[in-house]
Image (cartoon, rainbow, N blue to C red):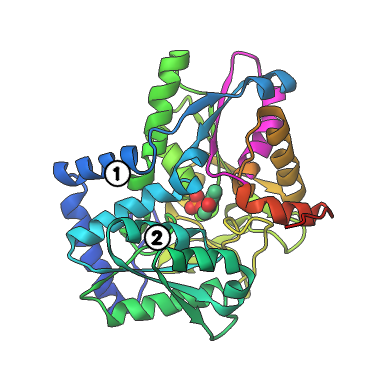
Amino acid sequence: MEFGIFGGQLVPPHILKAVKEVEEAYLKYKDDDVFNKELKTLYRDYANRPSLLYYAENLTNALGGAKIYLKREDLNHTGAHKINNVLGQALLAKRMGKKKLIAETGAGQHGLATATVAALLNMECEIHMGAVDIEKQALNVYKMKLLGATVISVEFGQRTLKEAVDSALEKWSLELDTCFYLIGSAVGPHPYPTMVRDFQKVIGEEIKAQILEKEQRLPDYVIACVGGGSNAIGAFYPFIENHEVSLIGVEAGGMGLETDKHAATITKGINGPIHGMYTKVLMTNEEISEVYSISAGLDYPGVGPEHSYLHDTKRATYVSITDDEAIKAYQYLSIKEGIIPAIESSHAVAYALKLAPNLDENKIIVVNLSGRGDKDVKQIAKYLGEQIID
Ligand SMILES: *Cc1c(COP(=O)(O)O)cnc(C)c1O
């Protein structure tokens, strides 16, 4: 296992063959200078990196405690951290001689990011999406098609994300010679959790350099929301050896941990297998639980295996924030700083709002603002019982 008892390659033999091919390619290219130079150039010229580290002075003054900095992943092309990962994996797929990217998507954010890089790198793109989700996310489906992707409607089972994963994996195993399966978070069988973390660690590396320049020291806290865990592990990883830096992952508390409507996998889950990895999973009677969050990016019943490891070894701490708290933070950051955060990122902001007033003024918090919140406006208005006319 890659992360203590967590990780692994728990997939059937026909898929293991494909996974092994990705592992081999990743080992070959991860320290390849030409590969890394090309990726860096794309990060800079296409994705708009380095993203800014912004001192949120209004927010800090209003709360009256620790200094709060925001890592602005929301300013990346396509509006979130996901682009860092899809650029890396798509470039690897190209090196492997693949012509087509396959991905699953739930709400559509990962599908959109994948379709974007497929267009950029002139590759075919096939997005598997549950029929139920297709109906709910018509705008994202339209955007994916605009970018040249084929969207496959998955018509079996519950017709949502889980079935979309099964459908994409089956298709991959049938078209191994030409296809690459592009996973959207730091989850799945090895090498995906490690590889996705390596493509996202640019976030933490930049935070480190930027805070040293601004404050001449490391932060006391790095806070990030956790769905599958890719933006969080990207922000945390470069600080793991810096024990003076507290790492805090924020899970979706949904309607509260005392209900069954949440997605707090690390807080409430048990060790078990899911999607090719051994990690913490929300399960009841050996069945994977239905999870819930107002945020489509956080409602996943598993979590990246490295987070399970960081939790059990006590290097990182995991907390949860409810829908209500996240929405308040969404509104608060908007009004205080003129920055509308993604509802996922609002979970991390909400925890910082609780923490900062209890800390001394000489403490420093960095919040990873994983994405922008334009996509969430309608849903928030609905939640608040307000109308948007369009
Ligand atoms: C997808 C998404 C997330 C959740 O994914 P992680 O892999 O946990 O980072 C968080 N924030 C935004 C803006 C997203 O789009």
Helix, strand or loop at label 1? It is: helix
| Span of residues in magenta | 347-373
Residue 63, position in %: x, y? 73, 23
Identify the residue at horizontal 41%, vertical 37% (top origin): 203
Q: Nearer the viewer, residue 224 or 381?
A: 381
The one of 230 and 143 positioned closer to us in this rendering: 143
Indicate which disc, 2 or 1, sits on the residue closer to the N terminus: 1
Q: Which label belongs to residue 42? A: 1
Q: In the picture shown, does residue 79 fall above or below 258?
A: above
Residue at the spot 65% in from the left edge and 52% down from the top edge: 376
Residues at discs 2 and 1 in contact (Cβ within 8 Å) = no
Q: Is residue 106 visible?
A: yes
Give residue 248's position: percent from left, percent from top. 56, 38
Q: Position of residue 7 (x, y in %)?
A: 38, 59
User: Which quadrant would the N terminus be assigned to in this image?
Assistant: bottom left
Q: Tag 2's secondary structure?
A: helix
Q: Is mark 2 within 8 Å of ligand 1?
A: no
Left or right of 181, for residue 261: right
In three-dimensional space, the C-alpha distance between marks 2 and 1, rounded to whole angstroms, equals 15 Å
In the picture of the structure, the residue carrying the numbered disc 2 is 114
Tell me the quadrant of the picture where the C terminus can be found: bottom right
Q: Residues within 10 Å of mark 2 (few under 14, many from 20)?
A: many
Above or below — where is 213 with respect to 317? Answer: above
Residue 39, by quadrant, is: top left
In the image, which disc is placed on residue 211? none
**Type of amino acid under label 2:** Thr
Label 1 Cα neighbours within 10 Å, binned few <14 / some 14-19 / many ≥20: some
Residue 358 lies in the magenta-colored region: yes
- Left or right: residue 61 compared with residue 308: right
Q: Mark 1 belongs to which amino acid?
A: Leu
Q: Residue at x 41, y 18 (%)?
A: 212
